[in-house]
Image (cartoon, coloured by chain):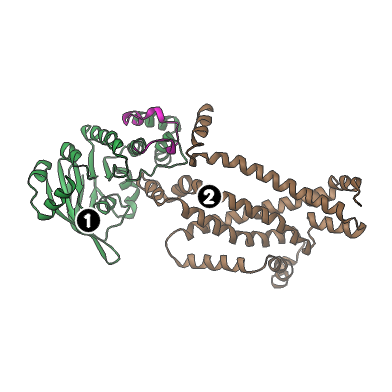
Amino acid sequence: MNFDPSTFWEALFSWPFLRGALLTLGLTVAAHMAAILIAVPLAVVLNGPPSALRKLITAYVGFFRAVPTLLQLLFVWNALPQIFPIFREEWFTPFLAAWIALSLNESAYQVEINRAALSSVDGGQMAAGQAIGLKKSHIYRYILLPQALRVALPPTMNEFITLLKLTSLASIISLQELMTVTQINVARTFQFSEYYAVALTWYLVMVYSLMGLQKLVERRFRWASRTEAAALAESRRGRGW
Amino acid sequence: MISLRNVDKNYGSFHVLKDISLDVAQGEKVVVCGPSGSGKSTLIRCINHLEPHDRGEILLDGLTVGAARDVLAVRRTAGMVFQNFNLFPHLTVIENCTLAPKLAHGIPDREARRMAEEYLARVHILDQAWKYPIQLSGGQQQRVAIARALCMKPKVMLFDEPTSALDPEMVGEVLDVMGELAAEGMTMICVTHEMAFARRVADRVVFMDAGRIVEVAPPEQFFAAPQSERARAFLSQISH
């Protein structure tokens, strides 16, 4: 076997790979955050009565799901500056371009997740919120969205993981994320297995940390389980509500 | 306190309420009964504007039901209890009770809790205050729902078949709480098939059929000598 452990260990904690992994994670978090911020209000509108706005949102979702992510990345990085001169300036970095393209792309998928999660909340919840005299905005914020979040979390985590790996597409617009750094080192040394193992390790670390985080968050949703609600109630009572 | 004048409502082509007029005085207890599909639930859901009515006028404690500026005030004046309880499953019992007072009236947490504890004690469920709804029986959940509504200090309580989703052995505990509330002078409109409760608590019974009020009478009179053929047929079906 031709695997050099010292190359592997040295590269694993080297600054270019660390920086690449951080860029990958940072881009994913930033793009997913933006996507969720875009998607929640759109999902709320889709969950409401029919309107022209709803048709527009449906078209938006269809468009960004239909266009390949790679094409969106290339469009934002190459075509946008051609159309609008303002994007030709220094501030328009590959990171920014990737962030815009991935945010828009991801928001379309996230709208569908959030819409489904919202419509899974029992209709009686809205009625009960209205009947005790709450405003629509309060009903959404304190009653519907917290319950929808429980349903949306697992598919949202799926999306995050997919997005984490999709960021490697940004290597094509010269963003120095994890896969770009890997490719550069492989091209320079032909030590495929060592550097691929480094990339693999970092992807695994990121995804598994995230899965741990998801487990922690899901503990807050134990109110939905007949068998586990008591444990959550007790733990909250122990901490003085 | 409540006044309905020639109220009409359609669901598409289905005429669900036809020319409904009814006055309910302060402190009065009215039981609404009738066959399913007769419009009973729609009627009380129109009073707090959960369902908009199409024609006619509804006044609640001087507020015009349906006027955009009065919507929240109307709903804070009328508390409602649903067939399926509709507690907020992600909140504990006491949080269910404090949410609206805190958000709608800006009452501080500590005070809202104190008030909620008072009402939870009145519906005999204070010992479950820290639990989640899923941990409670149906009867317990419905009593929490009553306390949640009372926490907004409503002037009127609307009950939409509050015992229909309960196991038979839990009906009594909910009806007892409603009876206590009635004895304290609360104005109540209650859609129910519990005729013993109607006999005991109601000042008047409203009998509806096919979207119309067919008969309004004190319970003794309604149960002993119903005037309409439909009411006679209905009563013979439910009292076997």
* Image spot of residue B182 (x, y percent): 22, 35
Quadrant of res A79: bottom right
Left or right placement of residue A26 versus residue B57 in this view: right
Per the rendering, the mark at residue A70 is: none
Q: Is residue B135 highlighted in magenta?
A: yes
The quarter of the image holding the C terminus of chain B is top left
What's the residue at 69%, 53% (across, down)?
A: A28
In the figure, the green chain has which letter? B
Which residue in the protein does label 2 denote? Answer: A151
Which residue in the protein does label 1 denote? Answer: B38
The local crowd at label 2, few if under 14, some if 14 to 19, many if 20 or more residues have their Cα within 10 Å, is some
Q: Chain of mark 1?
A: B
Q: Is residue A91 in view from this perspective?
A: no
* Image spot of residue B121 (x, y percent): 34, 28
Q: Report the magenta residues as a range.
A: B119-138
Q: Chain of mark 2?
A: A
Q: CA distance from mark 1 to mark 2?
A: 37 Å
- The colour with which the image depicts chain A is brown
Nearest the viewer among A165 and A27 is A165
Name the kind of residue labelled 2 in the image. Answer: Val
Quadrant of res B137: top left
